[in-house]
Amino acid sequence: MRLVSCGPFDDLIMRYAIPLVIFLVIAGFLASRLRDGYDPRILPSVLIGKPAPDFQLPELRDPTKKFSPKDLRGKVWLLNVWGAWCFGCRQEHPFLMELSKDGTLPIYGLDWNDKREAALSMLAELGDPYVLSGFDPDGRVAVDYGVTGAPETYLIDKQGVIRYKEVGQLTPEIMQNKILPLVRELNK
Amino acid sequence: MKLIVVFLAILFSVPVIALAKEARPVSDDPELEKRVMALSEELRCLVCQNETLAGSNAELAVNLRNQIREQMTAGKSDREIIAFMTERYGKFILFRPPVDRTTYLLWFGPFILLLAALIFLFRYVRRRRELIVDTPLTAAERRRAEDLLQTESGKTAA
């Protein structure tokens, strides 16, 4: 008995093409994860399309007043999660200021895991883009909203349903391409 | 010498300070605390995603552990608390992913790969076997082989 051939691996295709294909598949997968803007920490929100969780929080500026999303029925508005400790929020801040001057979309704040003095001094220093902010020092409301970090922004419609969530900073591009078209539709 | 002592004192005081900073509000009930930590082991810290809630000191993890503690004190079962968490953060918060439509690939993928490899191996071996051609020996070759075998066995016998 004698072996005529070393087997199917003699074929050029088997020998080179298959490893090449496997390599390309793996490389392609890895490249897709490296693409600009991909962040594994950004999770799909389970709350989109669901009613925004209700809460009653003292206002940041005036603790005797309460802030509840129920008071905003009939409005389309943004809920922006922030904190004076949060670097990304400071970076996002100028854009929020611009947005608030524009006045098309009211921004309400959720001051998360923060100290009142720190939050107030940040707003005194950089300006206050919020109609008002709820003060959530132990993150209770943030947990109800599935917040994983700051800044995060929710778009809430007239019926109090969450329509969009942005994890990370709002940018003019996100506003133009994603949020404003939705707002136009919701305001119809 | 004095300088060294001072230096060492500072050096060793640092971990103490660090420890003090990490102290977090815990209840006095060790049984409850055990339950909180056990459940926290099952949940993912969403800030540092490879850590469990039990192992993380991220502020969000502390918030979530406080939630768990409170809900346990209020008499909620583990199952109810897990439902509370997944309603807000999705199934991703579960450190042990449940078997469902979105995780079939995760759970069964390795077995599918194993099966594919076995099928490939089986076919490869079978194909190789087909390539082996039976070429009968010529009369001269046979005689030579017999000679060799005999001398070989003769040697061992001797």
Image (cartoon, coloured by chain):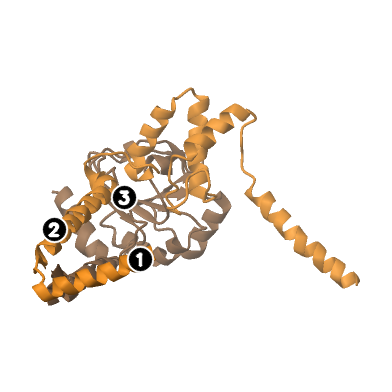
Chain colours: A brown, B orange
Instruction: Tell me which corner region of the image, top left, top right, bottom left or bottom right, holds residue B78.
Output: top left
Same chain check for tags 1 and 2: no
Res A151 label: none
Q: What residue is pinned by disc 3?
A: A154
Q: Is residue A119 visible?
A: yes
Query: What quarter of the picture does the N terminus of chain B occupy?
Result: bottom right
Q: Amino acid at mark 2?
A: Arg
- Chain letter belonging to callout 2: B
Q: Amino acid at mark 1?
A: Phe
Q: Amino acid at mark 3?
A: Tyr
- Front-most of residues B91 and A21: A21
Q: Within 10 Å of the Cα at label 1, are there few (<14), some (14-19), or many (20+) other Cα atoms?
A: some
- Front-most of residues B97 and B61: B97
Instruction: Tell me which corner region of the image, top left, top right, bottom left or bottom right, holds residue B30.
Output: top right
Q: What residue is pinned by disc 1?
A: A95
Residue at left offset 27%, top offset 51%: B110
Query: What quarter of the picture does the C terminus of chain B occupy?
Result: bottom left
Taking the view exactly as shown, the residue that stands out farthest to the top is: B75
Q: Secondary structure at mark 1?
A: helix
Q: What residue is pinned by disc 2?
A: B126
Q: Nearer the viewer, mark 3 or mark 2?
A: 2
Image coordinates for residue A171, horizontal then vertical, percent: 31, 65
Q: Is residue A32 left or right of residue A61?
A: left
Q: Within 10 Å of the Cα at label 3, are there few (<14), some (14-19), or many (20+) other Cα atoms?
A: many
Q: Nearer the viewer, mark 1 or mark 3?
A: 3
Q: Nearer the viewer, mark 1 or mark 2?
A: 2
Q: Is residue B78 left or right of residue B124?
A: right
Image coordinates for residue B70, horizontal then vertical, percent: 51, 31
Q: Secondary structure at mark 2?
A: helix
Image coordinates for residue A73, horizontal then vertical, percent: 27, 39
Image coordinates for residue B103, horizontal then vertical, percent: 26, 45
